[in-house]
Image: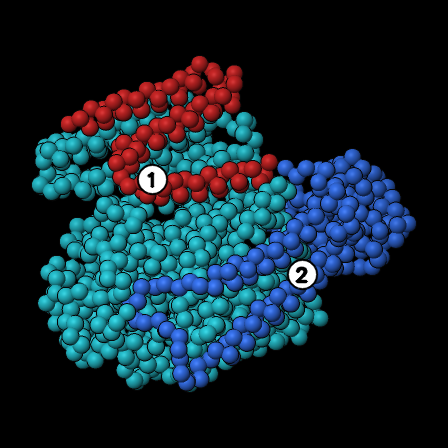
Amino acid sequence: MIPDAIAASVLQSGLIPRGTRVQVFSEIYWVFLGLGTLVGAVVIGYMLKNAYKYSDRGGADEKERPKLGEMPTGGGKGKKLFLSLSLSAIIVISLIAWTYGTLLFVEGQTGDQGVDVEVEGYQFGWNFHYLNDDGEYSGVNTTGTLRVPVDTQVNLQITSDDVFHNFGIPALSVKGDAIPGETTETWFKATEAKNYTAHCYELCGQGHSYMEAGVIVMEEEAYNDWYAEQRASAENDSAGNIAAAGV
Amino acid sequence: MARTKLYTGIYVALFVIATMQVGIEQIGLLEESYVLALALITAFSVIKAVIVAGYFQHLVWEPRSLTYVMMLGFVGFLALTVAASYSIQ
Amino acid sequence: MTDETQPRTDGGTATALPGDSHDDGSHLPPRWSIKRWLITTNHKDVGILYIVTAMFFLVFGGMLALLIRAQMWAPRAPGEGILSAMAYNQAVSLHGLIMVFWFLSPIATGFGNYIVPLQIGAEDLAFPRLNALSYWLYLASGLMVFASFFQGSTFAGGWTLYAPLNIPAFMPSIGATTTVFAIVTFCASVTVGGVNFITTIHRMRAPGLTMRSLPLFTWSWLLTVWMMLLAFAALLAACMILLSDRLLGTTYFAMTTDGGSVLWTHLFWFFGHPEVYIVFFPALGAMAEIFQTFSGNRIVGRKWFIVSMVLVALQSFIVWMHHMFLTSINLEVKTLFMATTIGISLPFDLMVFALIYTLIKGRIRWDTPMLYAFGALVLFIVGGITGVFLGAVVLDYEFRGTYWVVAHFHYVMVSGATALIGALFYWFPKITGKTYNEFLGKVSFAVFFTGFNLLYFPMFLAWGTPRRVFAYRPEYLVWHRIASVGAVILGISFLLIIYNLTKSLISGDDAAANPWPYSTTAEWAVSSPPPLENFPGTPSYASGALEFLGSDDDGSGAAAATDGGHATEHEEVHVDHASVWPFVTGVFSFVTVIGLSGLQVGSYPAGLEGLFYQATSVVGVVGLISAISAMGYENFTAHEGGFGETWPFGGVENTKMGMWVFLASDVVLFGAFIGASIFLRVAYGWTNWHPVPHNPIPGLVNTYLLLSSSFSVILALVAAKKHSRKGIVASLVITFVLGLGFLVNKGIEWLELFHEGVWLDSGVRASTYFLTTGLHMGHVIAGLLITAYLIWRAWNGAYSEGSGETLEYFGLYWHFVDIVWLFLFPLFYIV
């Protein structure tokens, strides 16, 4: 549906925000906020100005005013109306078109590179199954804490074991619906080795308010050590016990 | 009444088309060429529905606006079904 | 335009309340009698009932909001605060449901009821009893919501009712079932109302009042009811399927059904997005009226304003997936729905600019209605701009499920409420005949506007908070505190509004017929409140301006004309204004729902409780069928349409048009059921899915039976044209027998499947088969009940003497049921 050539050329033009999700989000957000505030201030300011200017202060009135029972009519200022409409249309359409480039960039990132983790929501917590390079379960899993390496793309495959949840790490600007029987894909890249919190963003029952997970971003080396250790202990367990490991 | 004859003819035609739909299944066209069979069966259903709406519900003799009202509902159904089904492809 | 053509504007001097002087012919008791309000079918009475009830639910929903804000006063650890986790979830869910379904839409319906017939020159709606029925079903549905709190727990899964949290496996309480039933009942109310208003506005306009010259409030209401008709049918389908999952044990939304959860989001949002405009349009129409009246200007670009509204109404049905950007839908569909979403914002830009430019060169008077309408526009602009953020998919990915969304839609929805409160002040003198306290009105606006922004604006600043939680990051504390304070202030403003209006109702000064200079629409040309039959003569715009033909036009007689001096032709036809059956139907629908709510996955609770629910179900169903039959049998004369403008439905009688409009909504209802089956089949793998019945032949036989029964209805109609009583009875009996044959055949098929162990709960294929053909079977059964009634009437000669119109209208329904089967048969038996 979207010709790759066009998509590629738009993406390479440099106009389109790229980078981590935090970068693209904040860049677009601030542009929207700036323009939105400006447009809002101009329109509301214009409203208030006219509201003040044309308030009824009595005095002579040479304009012909509406009368009771007249056939509803109204017109005039058509040019002005369409000029304003065109202006607002240009602003809105170009803003959205601009962000569409970033959408293509963001959607094009999942897959090949980085660490793959399957995120599974349940009432009321999160399981993380680490996948190997072939996209198969590696035997490593954790509950309640997602450990990822810094400066590496982390691909999430989000699903649910019971009801509809939504997994989001606000500080890393990543989010995806966790739907039973479905998998949604998203990704993020953390640029600092520190701790974050993931929340559930879809009402899922009694424990929704506290349905969180820790996100620990580790230095590459530390992560590799941890992962190797988990692998080893997973392999020591019998294959049938994999699910119980790593808590 | 001339209309009675028309109605009878339509009634017979509907009978035949319904039988043909099952006929398509019986001759094994669904196994042979599923898409063709599905298209034929759907087309037959649409034809029957249009005939019933047009003549039994006499939409052909009513102001066209009533047809549009029904189309509105039908287009809503199509939009929902097609877009939703496509969204998970 | 000269003064001679002006209707009298000072006709409000009639002494007695005009409505009271008519109780001789119409059996309508006076206004102070409670009985009047139970049996009235007059559109103005029903409008008042709607408005008062909606205000009541505003208070209810507002209390829940205050509970939420109290809980949010600080981030809470589990068990802290005034609400438990489950109580909080219930408050959040019911606050949303009540405000959207039981406050916003109904208060607009109240204005639609009271004002629209006056604006178009109709003496009442096309189907006055159905109008009363809409109201009683609305009230019954609201009382069901009340009851649900006392049945274990009410629904606690958010107003969006996402699957599979909404099924008994995760939400087993009986109250949750009652809540879903309440929504179904509300859908029924809305559908009945929609059919009524669409017929009325299209077919009962005064001569000369073409669609092009309809007042903007009427235009907005017309488009609202069209959207309601189609959108609520989809919600009805969604909630019926959900009820089937809850009561009967089908597995549409079960966790294990592929695509089940996503199916719910499609069905819900296919309704849910039009619902936004359903809620906002009447407010927009009211804003347009108020802006014109209080600026003394006709609206700028009227034609384009109307075109924009029509475009929005159409486009509203193709934007729903922007609520689903983070689900598993594909990128192509996201792109498409992003584009349609931008598309729908543009007509709104035009309407906003049109309203703003209307102020220019005006003589703006800042009475309370104008303050509210102006304030509403300011708030709507903020809501609109923050909505553009959500239209950008990349931003939406982050905003989804956060307080950004909460803040945005409150700015939009509550700006609608703001305009409707403006409308309440605007039309208060007309409706009550009293003047409200202007000073207190202005104060209430100041408090309202302050409270509104203190409540909702900080939510933008605390947007990182997830929705529907009460534990949040400490850095948001200050914003949530401000919001909670704002909530209290907003609440106080509502108390001021209610106090002002109640006090004015009791002891306010009498209002003039037209208290507002520069108002133009017809409701201001009659007394405040208007007489029972609305107009002092036959309203007409044929001369280019409103006139009351046949009324005393010499200048001094206007008062007499509204005071029962009815020597004019509109009194020649006796019309009814009272029927008790809509009320009784409402009562029994409540009883029925309470009874059925006890059913869960095929069985009632054990012991006394189960006995109560079963007995209540039986009493309810019997009462409901009796009440509806009694309403059908009752002699009731209403105004016919066609006296003036009827485009584009000239030559189609009111009842026939009503039937067609109803069928259009039924198309969407069945369409959503069929669409759900197709969607689930696609999710399952189209060709892996085989029909549940082993053999298409019984289905084919049923096709023959239904086609034949359709043909025999045609023969009944032919017999009616020949005035042959025997012919009619014979044809109808054949229809009945054929329909019965259909049911028997179907019953055998179901029984066989049941014995093989295939039933409603045997997986998604069986569920879709049983439920979709079951819905059709329900339509057949309803048709047969009507056929039995028609046979009895025909036997007594009802249709052989008359024109047989009733038979024709029934035929429309019966052929429709036939058509549906023509699609269900191949879908569920062959392919």
Occupied quadrant, residue C381: bottom right
Point out residue A41 in the picture as x, y percentages from the top left corner: 61, 70
Q: In the rendered view, would you say C145 is above or below C519? A: above
Q: Which residue is mark 1?
A: B67
Residue type marked 1:
Thr
Few, some or many residues within 10 Å of mark 1 (<14, 14–19, 20+): some
Q: Colour of chain B?
A: red
Q: Is residue C345 left or right of residue C795?
A: right
Point out residue C624 in the picture as x, y percentages from the top left corner: 27, 52
Residue at 78% of width from left, 35% of height from top? A134
Residue type marked 2:
Phe
Q: CA distance from mark 1 to mark 2?
A: 45 Å
C361, C16: nearer the viewer: C361
Placement of the N terminus of chain C among the 4 image quadrants: bottom left
Residue C461 seen in this snapshot: yes
Q: Is residue C529 left or right of residue A135?
A: left
Few, some or many residues within 10 Å of mark 2 (<14, 14–19, 20+): many
Query: Which chain is rendered blue in the image?
Result: A
Q: Colour of chain C?
A: cyan
SS at mark 2?
A: helix
Residue at 46% of width from left, 55% of height from top? C308
Say which chain tag 2 marks.
A
Residue C598 seen in this snapshot: no
Point out residue C660 in the picture as x, y percentages from the top left corner: 30, 44
Q: Which residue is mark 2?
A: A32
Q: Is residue C593 left or right of residue A94?
A: left
